[in-house]
Image (spheres, rainbow, N blue to C red):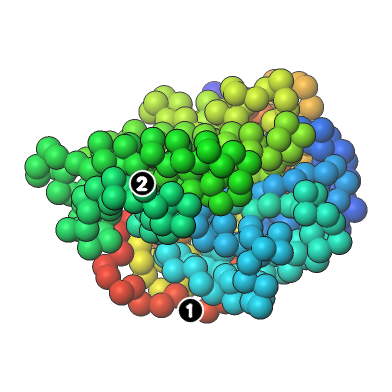
Amino acid sequence: MTDIGHIVVSHDIVADILDLARPLLSDSDLGPLVNRVGSSRFVCIGEASHGTHEFYDWRARLSRRLIEEHGYTWIGVEGDWPDCWRINQWLRGRGDQDLGARQLLGLFERWPTWLWANEDVVDFLEWLRDWNSTRPESKRVGFYGLDVYSLWDSLGEIMVWLEKYAPEAVESAMQAWQCFVPYQEDPHRYAWSTRLVPQSCEADVVALLMEVREQASLRAGDESAFDAEQNAEVAAGAERYYRTMVRGDRESWNIRDIHMVDTIDRIARHLGQDSKGIVWEHNTHVGDARATDMAQGGLVNVGQLLRERHAQEGVALVGMASFRGTVLAGAEWGAPELVLPVPDARPGSHEDFLHRALGEPAVLMFGDDRERPWLAARLGHRAIGVVYHPEREFANYVPTTMGGRYDALLWFEQTTALHPLRHEPPPREPEFETEPTGF
């Protein structure tokens, strides 16, 4: 492409962004977006990092309006099922009523604890509890963890439930528990052992899942049975996930995201056909993988799978992006949290064009025409993880066609780091990265 052609293309992209953008200064500016997506069964709200105040704050604002104005009944987050189930019960007035949101979130132990134990989540959960307190129990909004990591915690919850409701099944369930005992609650130690000796706990965990499903079916509609069955699904998924991850197999990404979408489906079925869900996850999970280079690598994600499974019911994908600022992250997996600089976006990236066009926060809604100059342009789109090195910014951009990846985007010029509830404690054991390899 000649320089003149590049200038023309750049001008067209900037003009297209200007045409789509509307100022984002207060909650009222979310109105058109809320009305656009409010009829969808599922609204997924992304974030370009897990450590940015503005992303958490505006995600909460958008969620509040969807709950208040369009009757959304549950929120699913990129968190562990047992931790989030405790919050769900608290929000519904069923447990830990002597604790506040700050104390509940302080119980989160998996690194990075700041992912949920931060001031923005405290503010939202306190609002949601107040909202629920004025409504009948059947109309209260739930809060659920979608992730696959909590192998040991989920196994423990299963055993407690069986002892209470199906003591005759405990003896057979102990086979799965005993299979993992030699690995001292370290899923990586277990996973590495399967590389050396081709023997795993897979059969025992699958047998446990089938047992719990059978026992839960006898208590259909019971909340504790639903919790137990999901913990069994997590245990089975986690066993497979960790075993795949240590092989350096990119399929571990797909195992995790398929598990999260299966969990979304189970929650939706449990809460009934009139339920409506909001999903909080990173852009890399929310934005449709088919509009990125993930697809060429054989990777799928939550946004793609929800669109494929639930197009008729309505799925809206909302991303977020920023130009510069600060972010909370670690220098390595398990390290203490740091407030790190986020440098100006890379020239030629989506963020660079948004900055040149706008220079202030904005909401951009994509209509039916996704072949417009900006929406059809395949450019880098920044993604910051919980481990971040600003000096390696070139590696943080995912080639993206914005019009295929999202249905709307919230844009911020300058962002600031989250405020954690506490400093990250030193790990009791060496921490190992639990993000999928190969991405």
Q: Is residue 29 left or right of residue 393?
A: right
- Name the residue at the left extreme: 197
The structure residue drawn at horizontal position 86% and vertical position 61%, both measured from the top left corner, is 134
Q: Name the residue under label 2.
A: 169
x, y percentage for residue 180? 23, 53
Disc 1: CA contacts within 10 A as few (<14), some (14-19) or many (>=20): few
The span from disc 2 to disc 1 (Cα, nearest Å) is 42 Å
In terms of secondary structure, where does tag 1 sit?
loop
Q: In front: 52, or 412?
A: 52
Q: How many marks?
A: 2
Q: In which quarter of the image is the C terminus?
A: top left
In terms of secondary structure, where does tag 2 sit?
helix
Q: Name the residue under label 1.
A: 423
Image quarter of residue 131: bottom right
> Relative to residue 236, is residue 139 depicted above or below?
below
Q: In this view, does 235 lie to the left or right of 419?
A: left
x, y percentage for residue 165? 48, 52
Disc 2 marks a residue whose amino acid type is Ala
Dot placed on the residue nearer the N-terminal end, 2 or 1: 2
